[in-house]
Image: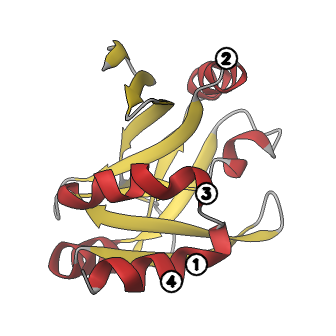
């Protein structure tokens, strides 16, 4: 059930409240031609934080138009940095490969929070699996989550 039809969206799925910021994934304009990103504007970060404090699990999704895949990032990237706008990274090759495999991941160190994080990329048919497990999924368990879902 969708409660808010503007970005960031609020909805209830299987009795769980979620808020989702959905942005297009685009080229990161860096030296690595495979590096892509989403940019989360300050106004969306503020809204997601409001929704999160109201009991909605805050999620960040990017849509990669070329492959038709979605990428999700750990919400700690929204709340642990003081940067006004936030860039979150993935790889073009990961998005394209996820279109073939159904789900992939990209690990990298976020330089603002100085921690390793994971971007999980999936096809639309795997979004429900992600929503079913995100509240109990530890960021360091993404590899087992991906292996499990590939074998379904």
Q: In the depicted view, which residue is nearer to us: 17 or 64? A: 17
Q: Residue at x 38, y 49 (%)?
A: 62
Asked whether, in this view, residue 81 is left or right of residue 18, the answer is right
Which residue carries the number 3 mark? 136
Label 4 – label 1 distance at C-alpha: 14 Å
Relative to 126, residue 116 above or below: below
Kindly identify which numbered label has been placed on residue 54.
2
Mark 2 secondary-structure assignment: loop
Q: Secondary structure at mark 3?
A: helix
State the mark number for residue 144. 4
Give how far apart the Cα atoms at labels 3 and 4 are. 13 Å
Q: Is residue 33 visible in this depiction of the protein?
A: no
Quarter residue 129 falls in? bottom left
> Which quadrant would residue 22 be assigned to in this image?
top left
User: Distance from label 3 to label 1 (Cα)?
Assistant: 19 Å
Q: Are marks 2 and 3 in contact (CB under 8 Å)?
A: no
Give the spatial CA distance, label 1 vs label 2: 30 Å
How many residues crowd around disc 4 within 10 Å: few (fewer than 14), some, or many (20 or more)?
Answer: few
Pointer 2 or 4: first along the chain? 2
Front tag of 3 and 1? 3
Whichever of callouts 4 and 1 sits on the residue coming sooner in the sequence is 1
Identify the mark at residue 107; answer none if there is no mark. Answer: 1
The x and y percentages for residue 73 are 54, 56
Q: Point out residue 20 in the picture as x, y percentages from the top left corner.
A: 45, 33
Q: Badge 1: how crowded within 10 Å, few (<14), some, or many (20+)? A: some
Residue 145 in the image: above or below residue 120: below
- The quarter of the image holding the N terminus is top left
Tell me which label, 2 or 3, sits earlier in the chain.
Answer: 2
């Amino acid at each position: 059930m969708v409660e808010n039809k503007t970005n960031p969206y609020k909805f209830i799925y299987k009795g769980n409240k979620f808020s989702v910021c959905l942005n297009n994934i685009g080229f990161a304009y860096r030296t690595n031609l495979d590096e892509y990103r989403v940019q989360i504007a300050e106004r969306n970060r503020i809204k997601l934080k409001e929704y999160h404090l109201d009991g909605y699990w805050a999620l960040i999704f990017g849509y990669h138009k070329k492959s038709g895949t979605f990428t999700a990032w750990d919400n700690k990237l929204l709340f642990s940095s003081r940067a006004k706008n936030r860039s979150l990274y993935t790889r073009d090759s990961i998005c394209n490969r996820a279109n073939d495999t159904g789900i992939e991941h990209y690990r990298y160190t976020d330089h603002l929070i100085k921690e390793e994080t994971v971007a999980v990329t999936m096809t639309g048919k795997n979004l429900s699996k992600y929503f079913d497990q995100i509240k109990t999924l530890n960021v360091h368990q993404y590899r087992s989550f991906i292996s499990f879902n590939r074998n379904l």
